[in-house]
């Protein structure tokens, strides 16, 4: 772990990550532990203090264990395939949607489950959100892309509501 003037670098078995730190937050390493403190206590610096602590914890966890997100594709004829670092989604449009996945993220596709794995929690989450945004699960039939285990609140159709 290296602490610079405005950034911190953490390295581990999963790679090396850097994060820019707000200059209003101080960082010290004592007895193998990282200590954060606001240089001047205001309402803003107290909020930054907690956010910075959480970001550093994510950096350390990312370079040691890594982060994983799973997405599930649901729908007749909906599928995903890989071509190198390019994800090809066929989700009901007239054309396949091609997304380029950052090189820092490992991606795998098995049947209807897309798995993203990487050291940077922010990048893994942003990439998963970008994939989900292509075709979010809709509330009537539940077709689309959703996070693994996510519950979609279903609505009743207008036909059923009119008769029942």
Image (spheres, grey):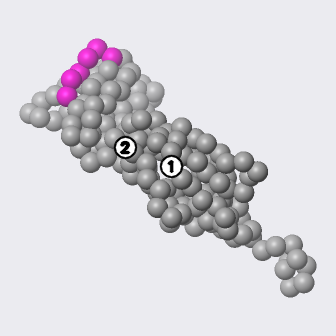
Residue 124 location in percent, x, y?
A: 44, 43
Residue 82 tag number: 1
In the rendered image, residue 84 lying in the magenta stretch gets the answer no
Q: Give the side of residue 32 with respect to residue 22, left or right.
A: left
- Examine the rendered structure and indicate whether residue 154 appears above or below residue 124: below
SS assignment at label 1: strand
Residues drawn in magenta: 1-6
Residue 39 location in percent, x, y?
A: 31, 20
- Examine the rendered structure and indicate whether residue 5 appears above or below residue 145: above
- Residue located 90% across and 84% down the image: 163
Q: How far apart are marks 1 and 2 (CA)?
A: 17 Å
Q: Which residue lies furthest to the right in this view?
A: 162
For this rendering, which residue is in front, 138 or 36? Answer: 138
In the rendered image, residue 2 lying in the magenta stretch gets the answer yes
Q: Look at discs 1 and 2 and give the one toward the viewer.
A: 1
Quadrant of res 32: top left
Mark 1 or mark 2: whose residue is earlier in sequence: 1
> Which quarter of the rendered picture does the C terminus lie within?
bottom right
Quadrant of res 43: top left
Q: Residue furthest left?
A: 31
> Which quarter of the rendered picture does the N terminus lie within?
top left
SS assignment at label 2: strand
For this rendering, which residue is in front, 136 or 26? Answer: 136
- Residue located 21% across and 23% down the image: 2
For this rendering, which residue is in front, 147 or 92? Answer: 92
The residue carrying pointer 1 sits among few (fewer than 14), some (14 to 19) or many (20 or more) residues within 10 Å by Cα, namely some
Which residue in the protein does label 2 denote? 118
- Examine the rendered structure and indicate whether residue 82 appears above or below residue 26: below
State yes or no: discs 1 and 2 in contact (Cβ < 8 Å): no
**Visible in this render: residue 129?**
no
- Residue located 51% across and 45% down the image: 83
């Amino acid at each position: 772990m290296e602490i610079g003037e405005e950034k911190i670098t953490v390295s581990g078995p999963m790679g090396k990550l850097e994060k820019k730190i707000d200059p209003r937050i101080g960082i010290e390493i004592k007895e193998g532990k990282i200590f954060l403190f606001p240089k001047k206590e205001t309402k803003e610096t107290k909020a930054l203090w907690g956010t910075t602590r959480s970001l550093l914890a994510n950096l350390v966890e990312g370079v040691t264990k890594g982060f994983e997100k799973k997405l599930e594709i649901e729908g007749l004829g909906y599928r995903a395939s890989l071509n190198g670092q390019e994800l090809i989604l066929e989700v009901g449009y007239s054309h396949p949607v091609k997304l380029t996945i950052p090189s820092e993220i490992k991606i795998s596709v098995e049947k209807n489950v897309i798995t993203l794995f990487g050291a940077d929690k922010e990048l893994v989450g942003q990439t998963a959100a970008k994939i989900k945004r292509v075709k979010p699960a809709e509330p009537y039939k539940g077709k689309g892309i959703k996070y693994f285990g996510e519950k979609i609140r279903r609505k009743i159709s207008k036909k059923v509501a009119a008769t029942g």
